[in-house]
Amino acid sequence: MRESAPEPLLLIDGALRPAADGGTFPIVNPATGTVIGSAPDATDADADEAIAAARRAFDETGWASEPTFRAHCLRQLKAALDSGFEVLRHITITEAGAPRMWTDGPQLRTPIDGLDYLDGLLRSYAWELDLGTAKPMGLPTRRNLRREAAGVVAAITPWNFPNQINLAKLGPALAAGCTVVLKPAPDTPWTGAELGRLIATQTEIPPGVVNVLTAGGAAIGRRITADPRVDMISFTGSTATGREVMTAAAPTLKKVFLELGGKSAAIVLDDYDVTAAASLTAFTACIHAGQGCALTSRLIVPRARLDEAVEACAQTMRGIAVGDPADPATVCGPVISAAQRARIESYLASALADGGKFGCGGGRPAGLKAGLPAELAGGYWIEPTVITGLDNSARAAREEIFGPVLVVLAHDGDDDAVGIANDSPYGLSGAVFSAGLPRARDVARRIRTGTVGINGGLWYAPDVPFGGYKQSGVGREMGVAGFEEYLEIKAMAEPA
Ligand code: NAD
């Protein structure tokens, strides 16, 4: 299957090509630690050409003013992704370590299907709004509001859900009439390059409208965020990098859209089955080895039920085999890199140093399960881990770990639970469990996050805006709100 995945190339002004100086960087399979290919390492000259092409396509072609043609191109892109699904699935499993199971959902299938939502939106969206007449300063005036594309977008994405995030930026940006320079993460260049290849070979999206720059470091990201020809930055990644992006965008006052980190809390109220809620939360904490910004990584339970909750989490996690992401039964694959594993291990050590203990896990799996391919011994594995014995001030309870690690905390009633959940610099997502729906909704309303699931409810869908309060971000991705991030509003007035 590896042979059938085309070589990654840059896409610049409609041309698929290597980096200007021929440079490449390795792509590593996190399940084996082996190099599976290489991607072009874009140079400053490549970035310069890509931005110039995006600028030209925006300023000098009809792209921004042809919504019907754009909808046609998005349908072509959807068809190309459907027909290239198995190749993209293989790339996603091997370069992101994404378990195959999740490629039928948020790792691939759902974001591709989300393009249909944009097609529907383009058919019905009101680009102009008649505000009627008024008499500002006594002058009868007819007013009209118009929505226009924001311009050239620099889209910078992380490695954890590469297709979801590449498409959640590219889709609405193109639907809105923007042109794009997409820079995928150094760990997952192949999924971005394959998207570029499909666009170049199987759609009529004009040259320059989409450019893809793979790069092994952060320099190209820095360059495109600072370039005055870029109108808007759409960034997903860590909060620390988000701050750098905002700073780099300040001199040219670009529109900045940020989707950042999280430390989301699941609250179990005292009228709910704590075992059921803890088991579900422990399971979701292991999805894609916990490398999801919106996965709940703190479980807050009634103090009297703490031991019961920890035991339920441990039992669930012991039943989740960390394993080969290509196996359709695997829930929890490897973490992305040796560096990420070391980072997670430093959090596990800090939890012990702060007086915590492990309900289960706490390190690397002792050995490979019988029957697994020997090459997996080189992968970056971490055992699903439950941490207990900490309060919310501990580092492991406050900072984003981004591994299959769940911290269980105790609360003393609804107000205390809300206080603990909100005592975080982040505000991305959350969950509430209560036998009384009005009580659950009341708590959900008080949690300061962009999304909240009630009693296991799933908010993830193409029409639901996703994003964070506080240091989890600025703006919303997906839904009408996510589409409108890529638009400007123009008010026009004429004598009535
Ligand atoms: P990261 O911040 O290290 O990198 C993200 C992207 O930014 C990469 O493409 C990287 O090359 C680029 N980059 C790095 N430094 C840059 C700079 N100074 N200027 C411009 N670009 C720069 O994040 P990561 O490790 O790839 O991803 C994990 C993080 O992403 C986690 O914190 C996670 O919570 C967050 N995330 C958030 C969401 C969300 O929607 N809120 C979704 C997924 C991941």
Image (tube, grey):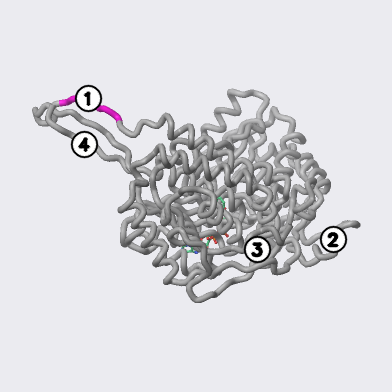
Q: Which of the image's four quarters has the N terminus?
A: bottom right
Q: Amino acid at mark 2?
A: Pro
Picture coordinates of residue 370, whole percent (x, y): 91, 57
Picture coordinates of residue 61, whole percent (x, y): 33, 50
Label 1 environment density (alpha carbons within 10 Å; few <14, some 14–19, many ≥20)? few
Residue position marked by numbered label 1 in the rendering: 132
Q: Earlier in the sequence, mark 3 or mark 1?
A: 1
* Residue 143, placed above or below residue 283: above
Q: State the count of labels.
A: 4
Q: Secondary structure at mark 2?
A: loop
Label 3 environment density (alpha carbons within 10 Å; few <14, some 14–19, many ≥20)? some
- Give the label on residue 340, or none: 3
Q: Amino acid at mark 4?
A: Met
Picture coordinates of residue 209, whole percent (x, y): 42, 53
Residue at x 29%, y 36% (from the top left corner): 146
Q: Is mark 1 within 8 Å of ligand 1?
A: no
Q: Earlier in the sequence, mark 4 or mark 3?
A: 3
- Given residues 387 and 259, the one toward you in this image is 259
Q: Secondary structure at mark 1?
A: strand
